[in-house]
Amino acid sequence: MNFITSVTNNADTHQLSSCVLSIEPECFVTDTTAVIFALAVAACQTIPKEIKIEGRTYQTDEWMNTPSSILSAIPRRLHLQPDHPLTITRKLIESRFPSYKTHNDLFPIVTTGQNFDSLGFPLDHTGRSRTDTYYLNKETVLRTHTSAHQADTFRNNESEGYLISADVYRRDAIDRSHYPVFHQMEGARTWDRRQAEKEGKTLAEVIWDDVVRIPKHDIAVEDPNPTFHAERNPLQATHSPEEAEAIAAHLKRSLEDMVVTIFNAARSATETNSASENEPLQVRWVEAYFPFTSPSWELEVFWQGDWLEVLGSGIVSQPILANASVPNRIGWAFGIGLERIAMLLYSIPDIRLFWSKDARFLSQFSEEKPIRRFVPFSKYPACFKDVSFWLRSSSNAAGGAGSAASPTSSATPATTFSTPVPPAAPLPPSFHENDVMEIAREVCGNLVEDVRLTDEFVHPKTGRRSMCYRINYRSLERTLTNEETNELHEKLRGLLVQRLGVELR
Ligand code: PHE
């Protein structure tokens, strides 16, 4: 809440409220201002008519579902803070792509056109729903991934390779590896077909020449699948098999080089004398699906006993490049989550720590010094409390554990994009687990570590559905008092009733 500087009454409003919310980057204000702000917002039914963020004004409408706590994260720009672990991670990755142009300050509020349409997301993709994505209005969202800038960056055509690092926003579960704001890095490398012609070579030959220049590594890579497969991972109609093979090789060698660098740094940081330390790094390519690449792959790394998915990638869908007025370019793109990489580089146990301003956290990281394992300054006690409720009889539960699809997963690949017409209005209210998460975040801020569905059943006679969630309260910085957690829990119960219309049991 530290960045909110002004709340002004606005006489000229629509029925939603009578407030204008304003968030500015440079001014730090006291917590008292933040409290006054929160009260003012509560008094005006929480939905301001107009929102001003860093000098840009947005009109809200019935799609608006972004709480002020999320908007107040925008000015933090953790990936640019000196000596922050996300900055160090970003720079480590950037160092493996020295010729790629970096874009690190792209504004997080984008159109649904940028975030979804330009990338060929089908209209019924779950990523577009208000349960998964933060909207300001029907056409304006907080970007859910850095791919939102792909089409624009291709259109600007400033470099053959680029890297975009940025904050991204998703309504999601609450646990130690999920936070509604996190950071991604997107990279892409494209070639111009006409350049190859000028050099009297095929495009595939030009790309293979570039593959040779990528630093070599000596780790074992499992890559059992063919580069493309008609059903599972199709070659695009406008690409020749030779071109796809060359682009795939460039993509895979480049990203393997990056991952080997990261994991070698992580292994020297963990300093264990265990046998695993000396075992060679194992990585593998698996087939994947994204609406905006084909064929597509994920790279997994064997880390502390498990295969860990570290990045998504693929050959850029040609319609994206054609629509971005660079039809002669062809190439690959990847996306990687920076928190996940930083957590294993430093052994950081909880994603909330990245937002900490506590010197006991921040002082442990330095851009100058070699990477060292994070030493937790303390683990304060947790306190869990359950809440059970009946859903409204008309509600059906969606988004239960494990069922919420990521904004990038979908069933059918898009090869040509038409201009989609967005759905007419928000869906009628039905229960979605992400709404419970959002209320828990609103009430508890960073004092909630984990929210889990522990029980669910349907009453045999009435057909009503009952849910039980376990809320794990824990501060990263101090011990919570009983009164404090009781108060939070009571407030949470009240808001569940008020917002979701559930009946407490
Ligand atoms: N945007 C994808 C995600 O958020 C990652 C990705 C980027 C995949 C670029 C392919 C190409 O998961």
Image (cartoon, rainbow, N blue to C red):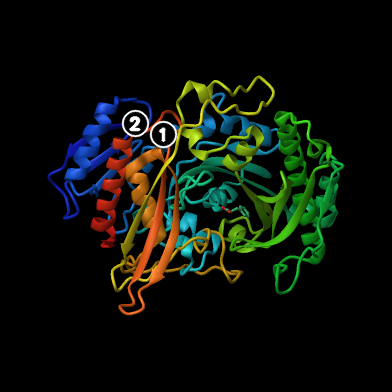
Q: Residue furthest left?
A: 11
Residue 218: percent from the left, percent from the top?
87, 42
Quadrant where the C terminus is found in the figure: bottom left
Asked whether, in this view, residue 154 is left or right of residue 504, the answer is right
Marks 1 and 2 sit apart, C-alpha to C-alpha, by 7 Å
Q: Which label's residue is closer to the chain start, 1 or 2?
A: 2
Judge by depth and name the residue closer to the eye, 123 or 73. Answer: 73
Residue 435: percent from the left, percent from the top?
36, 56
Judge by depth and name the residue closer to the eye, 231 or 424. Answer: 231
What residue appears at the point 69 percent right and 53 percent down from the top-left corner? 332
Residue 305: percent from the left, percent from the top?
72, 47
Can you say whether 461 is above or below 384 in the image?
Answer: below
Quadrant where the N terminus is found in the figure: top left
Q: Tell me whether the residue at label 1 lies in contact with that at label 2, contact meaning CB atoms closer than 8 angstroms.
A: yes
Q: Secondary structure at mark 2?
A: loop
Residue 75 is marked as 1
Can you say whether 193 is above or below 447 in the image?
Answer: below
Q: Secondary structure at mark 1?
A: helix
Residue under numbered circle 2: 3
Residue 140 shows in the view: no
Asked whether, in this view, residue 145 is left or right of residue 327, the answer is left
Residue 390: percent from the left, percent from the top?
31, 65
Q: Looking at the rendering, which quadrant does residue 454 occupy? A: bottom left
Q: Residues within 10 Å of mark 1 (few under 14, many from 20)?
A: some
Q: Looking at the rendering, which quadrant does residue 112 occupy? A: bottom left
- Does any atom of ligand 1 lie closer than 8 Å to the CB of label 2? no
